[in-house]
Amino acid sequence: MDGAVGADHRVSVEPRPVEGASATPIEPLRPVFKPYLGPEVRRAADAAFDAGWVSIGKLTYQFEDELSRYLGLEQAGRHLLAMSSGTAALHCACLLAGAGPGDEVICPSFTYVACHQAITATGADVVFCDIDRGLGADPESIRSLIGPRTKAIMAVHYAGLPCRIDEIRSIGREHGLRVIEDAAHAFGTRHNGSAIGATGDLVCFSFGPVKLITALEGGALVTPREDEVQIVRELRLLGVDIDRALRTNNRMWDYDVHRQGFRYHLGSIPSSIGMAQLAMADTFIENRRRYCREMSDAFRGIDGITVPDTDFEDIGSFIYFVLLEDADVRSRLVEHMRLRGVATGIHFQGAHEYTFYAGSRRGDLTVTDEMAARQLTLPLYSHMDDDTLGRVIESVTSFFA
């Protein structure tokens, strides 16, 4: 999700000096993230400006239709609604699940705080579950935390890798709980032959500045229930019911307000940009797969570094990460790479360490604490040039050499 720890959500670490290295890094630093904003994107923005309607309108609905076709939602009987951000989608998903004051929603601590803020924005309490060594929510940890106040489960597909979602959905059905999937990292990922979003219950995407496809800012909510479509349309537009007029770019001054709503709608300009990005999504996915495979091939077998356990065949990769022995090794590698002109990131520290969530109920978070100290994010973005890819690989391998 898009947020306050910089556009790429990095968390700073305290680097230790690299023995014998100069304090001056190679310039410029190769970034962790870099959105593709080529001529196709600029033309799409200009076309939206030329249309003269910049708020939610026909282009928003067209973006929804094209996303639905890309994800295969129509034949699955599912419905997608564009939102102003992935966080807005998560918030509305929590509301659809019935979360409110006195309720609890179970969610991994090891994810971006947008998930937790979406939960607490409803008045419900977040309950922190642990992750497994694939960095997704641990189903057994979830099961151990279910209580009389539990209203929903929120699962996260980390770095594009599907979590153990089949087991988590089964737990949800067993206890009558809705399962919300944060798929901000997983646009383009496939699971059991279907795109993430084409199965399950409530699924949320982000199209923020650094996601696999970007609308500059934006998100989407997928629901399997037709009766929830109009509810979400009203939630995203201050509770107002003027859907028919917006489809034709006509303002309608005679409307009704049915519920508490929010300013969560997606305008025409980001929708147009999103469609231009969507047309290139398969190319983005394929070249990111190549970069991930090359990095994994280069690092696999190096003592002290663990690469993602996947061949990336069905993965729409948002980030590429490695696991190191401990926080001390990570800190020294961060500085080593910086001095070789390569930026790094950390996704994520455990949210249970934040002041705002200090009193939140939680399970045993042993794996969360371990992985939060070991994880390191390396540069990955669409159309990354081979020189940058080579620099990233060399900066890691030279550290271990």
Image (tube, rainbow, N blue to C red):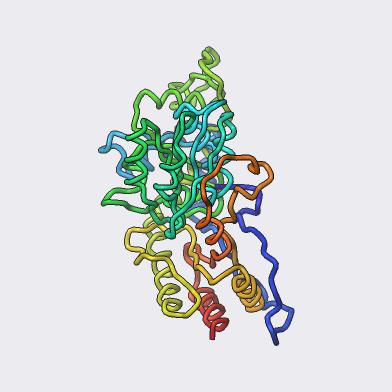
Residue lying at the far right of the rendered structure: 23
Q: In the displayed structure, would residue 315 be above or below residue 15? A: above
* Residue sitting at x 40%, y 33%: 178
Q: Position of residue 217 (x, y in %)?
A: 56, 44
In the image: residue 95, left or right of residue 179: right
Q: Please count the marks in the image.
A: 0
What is the quadrant of residue 237 in the picture? Answer: top right
Which quadrant is home to the C terminus?
bottom right
Residue 359 in the figure: left or right of residue 377: right
In terms of depth relative to the viewer, which is nearer, 134 or 269?
134
Q: Residue 361: horizontal and vertical position, in percent?
A: 57, 40
Residue at image location 27% in from the left, 38% down from the top: 76
User: Does the rendering let one see residue 85?
Assistant: no
* Residue sitting at x 47%, y 57%: 318
Q: Answer yes or no: is residue 107 visible.
A: yes
- Pick the residue in front: 171 or 299: 171
Image position, residue 17 (x, y; %): 71, 78
Which residue sits at x=62%, y=47%? Answer: 3
Of residues 116 and 371, the one drawn nearer to the viewer in this rendering: 371
